[in-house]
Amino acid sequence: MKKLLLATAASALMAGAASAEDVKIGILIGFTGPIESLTGHMANAAEEAMAEVNASGKALNGMNFVSVRGDSTCGDSAAGTAAAERLVTAEGIKGMVGGDCSGVTGAILQNVARPNGIVMVSPSATSPALSSAEDDGLFFRTAPSDAREGQVMADVLVERGVKSIALTYTNNDYGKGLAEAIAESFTAVGGVVTINASHEDGKADYSAEVAALAAAGGDLLVVAGYLDQGGKGIIQASLDSGAFSTFGLPGGMVGDSLPEAIGPALNGSYGQVAQSDSEGAAKLIEMAKVNSPAWDGTSPYAMESYDAAALIMLAMQAAGSTDPKVYKDKVMEVANAPGVKIGPGDLGMAMELLAAGQDIDYEGGSAVELIGPGESAGRYREFEIKDGKYETTKFR
């Protein structure tokens, strides 16, 4: 029945899009704000997926996918919501890659996506709270929940002989959820969390926060923050005061701008970030180098952004419709078995298979497998900073 319906859809007009009409997909991420050094790569990755499908000419009725960017700011929910409203009402997007940071993503989901029936596929919003958010079946994410990252970080710390940690987090949904997951997982394996304290982004002076962390002590300081904002400030203040010399770095602290800003003093710090070691990942890294514009396939959440855009387009093709209320039910289907495995560079073939009524299993660059409420099962790259570079230790 599934294949019959798909084949029938292939011969019908796409709902919500006339023949050869542009179909707009929003990219709503923080081009300004605490992860701004990452989002250019994320946007370019999502747009490469769209260009790949367009170049294939295999979308039903000759659809042409067009990217429309919006700035979520990552941290300002009101500004992110306003940007989302513009994409939906003024631009007429049919799907959204985004948001990026968890708090603003949750606000956009409740205040814009649900009222307007817009599918969101976030490449980087990782708060565990989003797993249980009311979403009307409209919200998905290609990055794993921080509940999983907390477990991974605890394993990393234990294997390195760490007995106690001081923990600081950015004071928002992302930071709170991640810090809770790290603390719970680390104490469950016998570790001690000496302090679990928030910090605000955008401050010029973090000496008071660092003094409290130093007084509590610990083998190292875990910073569940943002690399371009408060997390960086906490690390610099810790080094300046001699409070800590080694840092545990979760995903929000990963990006070239951090070691560039801190310098050699960051060498020896370590952590993990969501990333796959699959064949698809290796292929996408090479594709990124020759894309115009080029982007860094190893940059955090870039692969997940390519995959987020791909899932939206493939779900539309599978449903024979650009109406989010229709194609939302196909996202999980195209992302999981059974079906022909689809990696980066295979999107044209995938569109052709779907148009013929065949099943696909999209793996993409991040080894996509959507579980539970439509979120990635996820793998992590463990790293250590050496000579100012994030050197891979292993994958988990």
Image (cartoon, grey):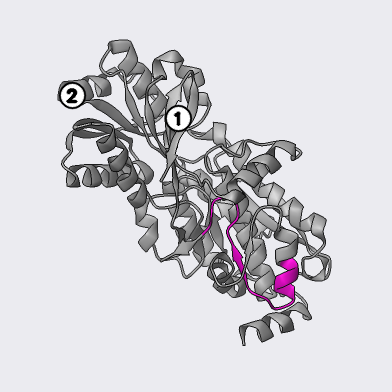
- Quarter of the image where one finds residue 225: top left
| 374, above or below 173, in the image | below
Query: Is residue 294 or residue 283 the one in the foreground?
Result: 283
User: Sequence order check: which comes first, mark 1 or mark 2?
Assistant: 2
Q: Which mark is residue 314?
A: none
1 vs 167, left or right, is right
Q: Position of residue 203 (x, y in %)?
A: 38, 24
Q: Find disc 2 in the rendering and name its residue.
A: 217
Residue 314 within the magenta-colored segment of the rendering: no
Is residue 94 shown to the viewer in this render?
no
Q: Which residue is mark 1?
A: 227
Q: Is residue 259 above or below residue 64?
A: above
Is the Cβ of the residue at disc 1 closer than 8 Å to that at disc 2?
Answer: no
**Number of disc labels:** 2
Please state which of residues 270 and 173 is positioned toward the viewer in this rendering.
270
Circle 1 SS class: loop
SS state under label 2: loop
Disc 2 marks a residue whose amino acid type is Gly
Q: Is residue 363 magenta?
A: yes
Q: Residue at x 60, y 69 (%)?
A: 324
How far apart are labels 1 and 2 at the CA level? Answer: 22 Å
| Residue type, mark 1 in image | Leu
Q: Closer to the camera: disc 1 or disc 2?
A: 2
Percent of width and height locating residue 390: 48, 28
Quadrant housing residue 196: top left
Q: Which residues are magenta?
A: 351-368
